[in-house]
């Protein structure tokens, strides 16, 4: 840890994660792996990676950004689409209407600033996804948000992930 003043202590990322939660709570980690696999079933893998990257951007999870950006690139996703994700609403021409609906839903589920997902956001997503697929998409969004909370809280260190390592 590095101290910047008397009241604030910052984590020094070069020393590794502050907590190796997966090793300390292996049953939770294994359950998360199974939950992640179940949530992805039936969803387009590229769409899943875009959703995971966007939620990870919002949640400031550097570890998950590293992982899902590498996985998306390895799966053939274009660099420019990944680069524009943080400004997707201003870069709509890079994405399909279906992807835009998924990204908007990802933001609504991830942020929950008003305490709910707005009806218009949900309805837009429902127009582009069949009910079962929408349930899977919501599940995938919830799961990446859970992963982000583990990653950010444990301060998992980005940069060491190899594409496809955790598939």
Image (cartoon, grey):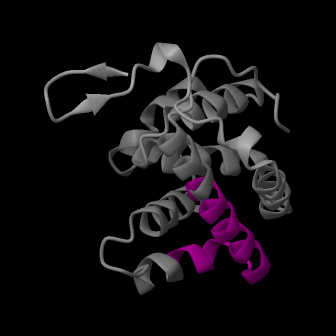
Looking at the figure, which quarter contains the N terminus? Answer: top left
Give 77 or 5, whichever is nearer the viewer: 5
Front residue (pair 63, 96): 63
Q: Quadrant of residue 28?
A: bottom right
Q: Is 127 colored magenta in this rendering?
A: yes
Q: Against 143, is 15 above or below? A: above
* Image: magenta residue range: 124-145
- Extreme residue in the left direction: 6
Magenta: main secondary structure: helix
Q: x, y percentage for residue 64? A: 59, 37
Q: Is residue 13 shown left or right of residue 3? A: right
Q: Which residue is drawn at the image coordinates 62% and 50% (left, top)?
A: 147
- The residue positioned 66% from the left and 59% from the top of the image is 143
For the image, the number of numbered tags is: 0
Say whether residue 161 is magenta. no
Name the side, left or right, on which 105 lies relative to 11.
right
Q: Is residue 91 visible?
A: no
Task: Specify whether residue 133 is in view.
Answer: yes
Q: Position of residue 24 (x, y in %)?
A: 72, 43
- Viewer-side residue, 125 vs 12: 12
Q: Position of residue 103 (x, y in %)?
A: 51, 57
> Which quadrant would the C terminus be assigned to in this image?
top right
Q: Residue at x 45, y 44 (%)?
A: 93
**With 101 as the anchor, is 132 left or right in this view?**
right
From the top left corner, tell me how far across and down residue 20 is, in percent: 65, 35
């Amino acid at each position: 840890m590095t101290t910047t003043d008397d009241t604030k202590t910052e984590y020094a990322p070069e020393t590794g994660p502050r907590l190796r939660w997966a090793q300390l709570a292996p049953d939770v980690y294994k359950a998360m792996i199974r939950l992640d696999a179940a949530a992805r079933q039936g969803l387009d893998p590229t769409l899943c990676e875009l959703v995971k990257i966007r939620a990870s951007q919002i949640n400031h999870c550097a570890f998950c950004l590293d992982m899902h950006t590498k996985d998306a690139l390895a799966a053939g996703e274009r660099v420019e689409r990944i680069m524009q994700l943080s400004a997707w609403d201003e870069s709509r021409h890079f994405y399909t209407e279906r992807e835009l609906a998924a990204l908007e839903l990802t933001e609504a589920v991830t942020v929950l600033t008003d305490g709910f997902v707005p009806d218009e956001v949900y309805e837009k997503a429902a127009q582009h996804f069949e009910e079962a697929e929408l349930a899977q998409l919501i599940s995938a969004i919830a799961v990446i948000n859970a992963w982000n909370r583990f990653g950010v809280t444990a301060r998992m260190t980005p940069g060491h992930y190899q594409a496809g390592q955790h598939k």
